[in-house]
Amino acid sequence: MSLESLAVRKSRPHRFDPALQGHKLTIAYRGTEFSGWQCQPGKRTVQECLESALEKLWGKKISLQGSGRTDTGVHALGQVASFNAPRLHNAIVLQRALNANLPRDVRVVNCRLVSPAFHARFDAIAKTYRYLVLNHLVQNPFTLDTHWHVPRPLDLPSMRRAAKMLLGRHDFASFTSNPGYERESTVRTMTRASVVRDGAILVFHFTSEGYLYRMVRNLVGGLIKVGLGKMTANDFGRILKACSRSEAPANAPACGLYLMNVKYPAKKAPSS
């Protein structure tokens, strides 16, 4: 777990009613038409859609906690959310009922009944993000909202050398944007940073204990600059060590980013 997450956990301890049933939802959504995950007045968000569906089923407002926020236009295949409420249905029936009350661009892909102590955000120990780049001269109209189009050739070996520098524990201050709030630390541990080519598609994967605001998009933006020959892998490593956002290139657009999965200790979210 990241230092920032630990700090939040200390300042805002999770309290729960053991008489209620815990619920763990795994959610997929197409982020194109959403103003991100978190509820915002007057805006369409994933959390708002899910809480609206929960309210229809329980007849009262149910507070839903996500594993983390995703920005406007960011997609998810494995976002996780949790809530506590009186037991209403078994997991299979609840999943069907929720999906019947959700818009077509968001779906509950898995539902489990868990301990009320489970918390989607505080109990997460790692997250994996994927980023997709269409590296082809011609834009594919079917990937407009799902891939970043980069038409120029990319130097994949140089990008891989740069990505390898991200592994381990580093201060990622150079690769974060200002979130509008104070952070405890900008140090994170990265256990996976890879880029592979699948035809005209470049697929980036990042796994870390935690992320800073727009960190993955900033990393991809830097790696693409390396691929374009606008800086070397050594330049990329120097920017990482500089711990200054002013040293780094612009971030990648939101459309290519996907939250793939969230990892938890096995004992924290048993199925029932």
Image: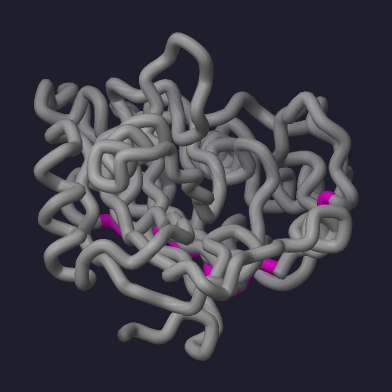
In this rendering, would 50 be left or right of 70? left
Res 54 seen here: yes
Residue at the location (33% across, 60% down)? 26
Please state which of residues 172 and 111 is positioned toward the viewer in this rendering: 111
Position of residue 224 measured from the top left corner of the image (x, y, whole percent)? 49, 38
Relative to 105, residue 112 above or below: below
Q: Quadrant of the N terminus?
A: bottom right
Relative to 29, residue 207 above or below: below
Q: Report how many numbered discs are placed on residues in the image.
A: 0
Q: Is the magenta stretch mostly helix, strand or loop?
A: strand
Q: In which quarter of the image is the C terminus?
A: bottom left
Q: Does the magenta stretch include residue 193?
A: yes
Please state which of residues 183 and 205 is positioned toward the viewer in this rendering: 183
Range of magenta residues: 186-197
In this rendering, would 19 be left or right of 156? right
Relative to 61, residue 76 above or below: below
Residue at the location (61% across, 25% down)? 250
Res 147 seen here: no
Q: Is residue 176 magenta?
A: no
Residue at the location (47% across, 60% down)? 84
Position of residue 125 measured from the top left corner of the image (x, y, whole percent)? 61, 72
In this rendering, would 254 be left or right of 153? right
- The quarter holding residue 45 reads top left
Please state which of residues 69 and 102 is positioned toward the viewer in this rendering: 102
Specify how the rendered protein is coloured.
one colour
Position of residue 214 measured from the top left corner of the image (x, y, whole percent)? 61, 36
Please state which of residues 90 and 249 is positioned toward the viewer in this rendering: 90
Residue at the location (18% across, 59% down)? 95
